Image (cartoon, rainbow, N blue to C red):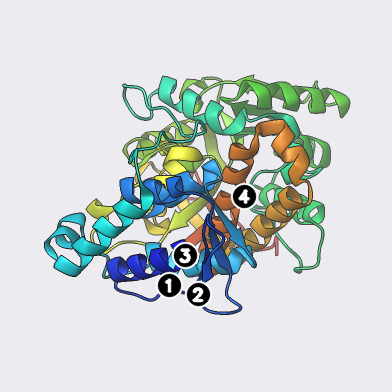
């Protein structure tokens, strides 16, 4: 009788010291596990070899991206169960502890026999190939941005929809359209910045130009949008031209550190600061402060993580660093506020949009799943699988409060301390 699923379940439970909450369907057709639960489909022995070589998140990710693993049933429920088993366990033991424990060592050897040789399969081609050099240099940041954003504009159209906004939307209610929620987010940013006709706005990390176009068209400002992605810039320039706004919107391929034509009346940085890195964050904040006119406002829209008891223990997410955002770093919102204040800003408002990002990500996942065959044709099956896993896992991260997203409104307050803010600042709500 085929029994790979039962053997795999037993060995994994011995190794983990916990019962597997998912069903398993193995390459030999065998099945086991709790009835009604989502199933982890182990398509071949190579999947087991990947887990042995890189236990935990990265091994699972490699097997998923390569198509060695799949999921039957509720995708989000399966990821939630895996999260509790792999990412959220406080009692995860080190490899050395596993080898010292006789039953665990026996389970490990059993998995090796089940997996067969060769033990070390090559990573999927979608994994980022690291090169030597300083992290968050101009060169490395440009390479990282290119990896993520130069996937192809047609693919982003498929996922993001007509708004072409790749950041958290602002939902009036869960049943609103994605386009309406993204429009409301762009307008919220403009109102927080108190944009007025004739002002100059710098949009840092302008993406495909949506914020620049909305600000110029609806608020009459002159906008400079900067990005490191050639594909984004070309797409944004065409959209600007089609909207008849070339006299008011300029799109540049430029690093924020190289902008030298201030002062600007306002700066928007929406979903860009996650790429900056902790070592460069104060420099980022100081550069933006220096580009603002006295009384000018910054709207910094940024993903946050929960603080750790020991911040020195923070490590980049293995899957996201290897497949999605190379060198991307998250910080607690308190750290972000502190760095902005160290740069000279007066922080006037912090608004959490955590639930809004969960809704946004689920809509993007739905767009991808509804157009799956086209997505695979555009990017290949591996890259499409990367995006489905990344966005769905992030949606759960926001829903479970492991991730946050905050809009921080800060002012370059001129002497003698007049901020220019109204007494009741949240007039935008």
Instruction: Mark yes or no: residue 10 visible.
Output: yes
Residue 325 seen: no
Residue at screen point 44% across, 69% down? 6
Q: Which residue is mark 2?
A: 33
Front tag of 4 and 2: 2
Q: Badge 3 is on which residue?
A: 5
**Among numbered discs 1 and 2, the one appearing first in the sequence:** 1
Verify CB contact (< 8 Å) between mark 2 and mark 3: yes
Which element is circle 1 on? loop
Can you give x and y, in whole percent of width and height, for residue 121 in the image? 39, 37
Label 1 close to label 2 by CB (< 8 Å): yes
Precedes in sequence: disc 3 or disc 4: 3
Q: CA distance from mark 1 to mark 3?
A: 12 Å
Q: Residues within 10 Å of mark 4 (few under 14, many from 20)?
A: some
How far apart in space, not on screen, are marks 3 and 4 (Cα)?
Answer: 25 Å
Determine the residue located farthest toward the bottom in the rendered image.
Answer: 35
Q: Are marks 4 and 1 in contact (CB under 8 Å)?
A: no
Is there a contact, CB below 8 Å, between mark 4 and mark 2?
no
> Nearer the observer, disc 1 or disc 3?
3
Q: Which residue is mark 4?
A: 388
Q: CA distance from mark 4 to mark 1?
A: 23 Å
Residue 302 is situated, as x and y percent measured from the top left of the image, at: 52, 49
State which tag comes first along the sequence, 4 or 2. 2
Q: Which mark is residue 20?
A: 1
Q: Residue at x 48, y 24 (%)?
A: 143
């Amino acid at each position: 009788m085929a029994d790979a699923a039962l053997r795999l379940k037993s060995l994994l439970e011995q190794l983990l010291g916990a019962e597997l909450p998912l069903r398993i369907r193995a390459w030999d057709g065998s099945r086991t596990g709790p009835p009604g639960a989502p199933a982890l489909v182990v398509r071949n022995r190579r999947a087991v070899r990947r887990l042995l070589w890189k236990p935990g998140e990265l091994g699972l990710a490699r097997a998923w991206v390569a198509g060695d693993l799949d999921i039957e049933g509720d995708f989000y429920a399966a990821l939630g169960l895996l999260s509790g088993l792999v990412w959220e366990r406080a009692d995860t033991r080190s490899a050395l502890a596993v080898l010292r424990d006789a039953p665990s060592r026996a389970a490990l050897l059993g998995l090796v026999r089940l997996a067969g040789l060769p033990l070390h399969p090559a990573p999927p081609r979608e994994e980022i190939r690291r090169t030597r050099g300083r992290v968050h240099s101009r060169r490395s940041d440009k390479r990282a941005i290119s990896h993520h954003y130069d996937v192809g504009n047609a693919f982003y159209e498929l996922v993001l929809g007509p708004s072409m906004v790749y950041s958290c939307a602002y939902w009036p209610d869960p049943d609103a359209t994605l386009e309406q929620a993204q429009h409301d987010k762009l307008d919220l940013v403009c109102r927080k910045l108190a944009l007025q006709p004739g002002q100059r706005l710098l949009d840092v990390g302008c993406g495909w130009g949506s914020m620049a176009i909305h600000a110029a068209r609806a608020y009459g400002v002159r906008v400079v949008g900067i990005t490191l992605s050639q594909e984004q810039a070309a797409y944004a320039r065409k959209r600007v031209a089609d909207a008849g706004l070339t006299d008011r919107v300029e799109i540049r391929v430029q690093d924020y550190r190289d902008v030298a034509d201030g002062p600007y009346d306002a700066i928007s940085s929406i979903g860009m600061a996650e790429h900056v890195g902790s070592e460069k964050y104060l420099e980022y904040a100081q550069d933006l402060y220096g580009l603002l006119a006295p009384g000018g406002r910054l709207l910094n829209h940024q993903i946050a993580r929960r603080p750790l008891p020991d911040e020195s223990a923070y490590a980049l997410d293995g899957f996201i660093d290897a497949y999605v955002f190379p060198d991307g770093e998250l910080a607690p919102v308190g750290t972000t506020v502190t760095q902005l204040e160290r740069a000279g800003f007066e922080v006037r408002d912090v608004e959490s949009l955590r639930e809004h990002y969960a809704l946004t990500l689920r809509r993007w996942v739905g767009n991808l799943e509804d157009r799956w065959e086209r997505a695979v044709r555009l990017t290949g099956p591996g890259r499409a699988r990367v995006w489905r896993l990344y966005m769905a896992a992030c949606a759960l991260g926001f829903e479970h409060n492991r991730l946050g997203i905050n809009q921080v409104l800060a002012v370059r307050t001129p002497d003698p301390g007049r901020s220019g803010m109204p007494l009741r600042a949240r007039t935008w709500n």
